[in-house]
Image: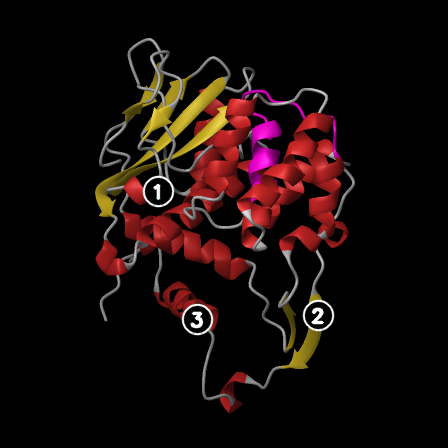
Amino acid sequence: MYCYGGYQDEARRITRGHSEDNLKQINTFYVDFDDRTLTNSAILVASLDLGFMPTAIVKTERGYQVYFVLSSPAYVTARTDYQVIKVAKTISQNIRNYFQKEGLPVDKACNHFGIARLPIEDNLEFYEPSYVYSFDEWLWWSLKQETAIKPKTNLTVLSGSDGLKQTDEPWFKLLLCATNIRGHKALLGRNNALFTLALACYGSGMAEQACRLLLGSFLERLEEPLSQIEFDKTIKSAYSGRYEAASRDYILSLCRAWVSPDLRPSDLFSYQRWYKFKKPRDQRVKSHLWEWEADVLDYLEKISFEASPFIQT
């Protein structure tokens, strides 16, 4: 939920107020599926293994929007340094990753806190008001997803990129030279590519005017270029300071869509790699957070059973 919102133009196509620094509270997680052949039954079946059933499923022209409503809002406050937004984004991304692994057509370009379709009788295909869950329940589920992919061997690979600018990365040059990038709804296309390139310029310390010159050439090379208005709006947004750099998964999806589907992460990202052997945990003074999480989950799994799911300590 935003503090305020509206439209900037009479045609009601350009919104205002829909930015993360204007968020007041998180009420719902939602996933956008873009495939007309998909059924709401397939979504419900996939949700069974997720462990959280959707509160509502809304039919759209292109597929479905699935809503997981929270039992109580998660409030965004300065007192917590707006950490709720970052945590909610992680949970939302893990939900999308789950459905994608289940083979469902998730729209990865959809804003985590975007404008969603209003449910009405004509498009509401499923609704169960009792299917609501707390933010903490989602957080615990999300932590388990993160724990499952943490390295747990004595050999740890540490990676860093001190001194390496994003504009020097291989992916930046590959995407910058792509000329066939198009723009369609529910597609990682021109706007996404331009915004990602502009974020890399901003994160690399490039002046906005220099970025405009560089990406202006990129725009001219496109077979289907963006309008100047869209170009200006995208650059201004990237340089607003409200956004972090694009995630690797996002960059990888863009490059595989418009450069080559066979690209690997090692083809796109440069790192300074070094290895070190980590001491056994009983010889260390400090432990990693993921080790604490694993301890708690392991403890709960050992002492909880279906017949007695409630634990008191």
Task: Give the labeled residue for mark 3.
Answer: 289
Label 3: few (<14), some or many (≥20) within 10 Å?
A: few
Cβ–Cβ under 8 Å for marks 1 and 2: no
Is residue 192 on the magenta stretch?
yes
3 or 1: tag closer to the N-terminus? 1
Which quadrant does the N terminus fall into? Answer: top left
Could you say which is closer to the camera, residue 75 or residue 28?
Answer: 75
1 or 2: tag closer to the N-terminus? 1
Q: In the picture provided, is 297 more to the left or to the right than 164?
A: left
Could you say which is closer to the camera, residue 16 or residue 128?
Answer: 16
Secondary structure beneath disc 2? strand
- Taking the spot 43% from the left edge, 48% from the top edge, the residue there is 241
Magenta segment? 178-198
- Taking the spot 33% from the left edge, 8% from the top edge, the residue there is 122
Foreground label between 3 and 1: 1
Q: Amino acid at mark 1?
A: Glu
What is the x, y in percent for residue 71? 23, 41
Foreground label between 1 and 2: 1
Task: Give the labeled residue for mark 1.
Answer: 20
Q: Amino acid at mark 3?
A: Leu
Separation (CA) of disc 3 from disc 1: 27 Å
Relative to 121, residue 262 above or below: below
- Taking the spot 55% from the left edge, 53% from the top edge, the residue there is 203
The answer to whether residue 175 shows anywhere in this view is yes
Task: Give the labeled residue for mark 2.
Answer: 273
What is the x, y in percent for residue 90? 44, 49
Q: In the picture provided, is 72 more to the left or to the right than 40?
A: left
3 or 2: tag closer to the N-terminus? 2
User: Which residue is the extreme one toward the top?
Assistant: 122
Could you say which is closer to the camera, residue 120 or residue 282?
Answer: 120
Foreground label between 3 and 2: 2
Q: In the picture provided, is 74 more to the left or to the right than 90?
A: left
